[in-house]
């Protein structure tokens, strides 16, 4: 399979970057779009990289946050045939609250949910996209005091509950050397998710895992939201599971990436806008 990073937080001159993620995946002769970033800039990058979004046959939204979904306006303008598969609950009201600040809406903007409702298809359970491709609901978030929690879902007027991320799922593709797992933010914990995937597909090794690891702090890619002990445990679990390669970026952050790389070495790589990955 071939993967192109259409937008990410970092990248080279000549391509747009933003706090968001979008991946273009070519698999078994079909084209898949995973997420769309926070604006339409990913579509401009696609054009610069000679990728035709009109040809996308399958589209997946990883979860219900704006930095993965608000670029859908540009996708729908370019593509009139592919539905976008979302986990049930992804279209709900999602918020961020840090340090007692007022709730900040971080969900999919309402005009997208309203104007393109006919293109947003909710799925449940273990969903088979095609032969060798599945959407797998994330497990319950790991309980750890070593990683900050600041994301909530709105249940009613002034009534919020910690987000359980039941609106988030992994895209899993069967590769030549094992499973290739895509989870854009890993809010439930990347090691927790990898263990869940291993349990869902027993006997099949995880050849690669791509996505953000939700270790970035509130000030951007130079910040961190978790303790070194948490990162060390995460790296140890991923090694014990035998995950072959890890490609990360977006919500991982550079401090956490450096700590992970101390343990994972060359198995861990940073994704940037415009990167092309062949697995």
Image (cartoon, rainbow, N blue to C red):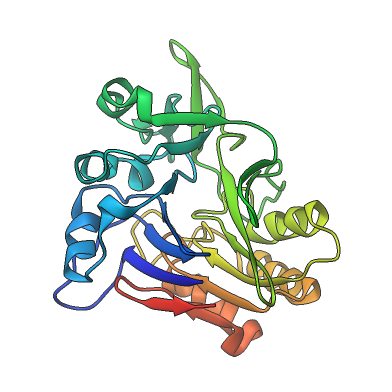
Residue 269 is left or right of residue 41, and the answer is right
Total marks shown come to 0
Direction from residue 237 to residue 33 in the image, left or right: left
In the rendered image of this protein, does residue 206 appear above or below residue 40? below
Residue at 48% over, 79% down: 278
Please tell me in which quadrant of the rendered image residue 96 appears.
top left
> Looking at the rendering, in which quadrant would you find the C terminus?
bottom right
Q: Quadrant of residue 213?
A: bottom right
**Front-most of residues 27 and 62:** 27
Q: Residue at x 70, y 61 (%)?
A: 191
Residue 195, position in %: x, y?
77, 58
In this view, the residue in front, 128 or 260, is 128
Q: In percent of the image, x 41 and y 65: which residue is there? A: 223
Q: Say left or right for 132 vs 252.
A: right
Q: Is residue 102 visible?
A: no
Q: Residue furthest right?
A: 203
Using the image, determine if residue 194 lies above or below residue 207: above
The residue furthest front is 29
Question: In x, y percent, where is residue 201?
Answer: 79, 56
Q: Write the residue at 35% across / 42% down.
A: 69
Residue 34 picture location, percent across and down: 43, 53
Residue 2 vertical position relative to residue 264 in the rendered view, above or below: above
């Amino acid at each position: 399979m071939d993967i192109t990073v259409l937008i990410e937080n970092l990248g080279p001159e000549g391509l747009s970057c933003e706090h968001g993620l979008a991946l273009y995946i070519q698999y078994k002769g079909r084209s898949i779009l995973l997420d769309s970033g926070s604006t339409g800039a990913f579509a401009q990058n696609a054009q610069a990289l000679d990728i035709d979004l009109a040809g996308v046959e399958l589209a997946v939204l990883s979860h219900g946050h704006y930095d993965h979904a608000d670029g859908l306006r540009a996708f729908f303008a370019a593509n009139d045939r592919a539905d976008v598969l979302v986990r049930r609950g992804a279209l709900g009201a999602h918020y961020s609250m840090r340090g007692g600040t007022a709730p900040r809406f971080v969900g999919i903007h309402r005009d997208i949910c309203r104007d393109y409702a006919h293109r947003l298809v909710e799925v449940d359970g273990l969903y088979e996209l095609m032969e060798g491709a599945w959407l797998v609901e994330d497990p319950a978030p790991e309980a750890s005091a070593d990683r900050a929690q600041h994301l909530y879902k709105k249940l009613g007027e002034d009534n919020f509950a910690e987000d359980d991320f039941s609106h988030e799922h992994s895209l899993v593709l069967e590769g030549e050397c094992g499973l290739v797992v895509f989870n854009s933010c890993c809010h439930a914990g990347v090691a927790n998710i990898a263990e869940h995937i291993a349990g869902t597909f027993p006997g099949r090794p995880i050849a690669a895992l791509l996505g953000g690891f939700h270790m970035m702090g509130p000030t951007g890619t130079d910040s961190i939201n978790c303790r070194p002990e948490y990162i060390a445990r995460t790296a140890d679990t991923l090694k014990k599971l035998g995950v072959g390669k890890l490609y990360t970026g977006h919500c991982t952050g550079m401090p956490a990436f450096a700590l992970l790389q101390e343990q994972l070495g060359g198995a861990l790589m940073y994704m940037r806008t415009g990167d092309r990955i062949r697995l």
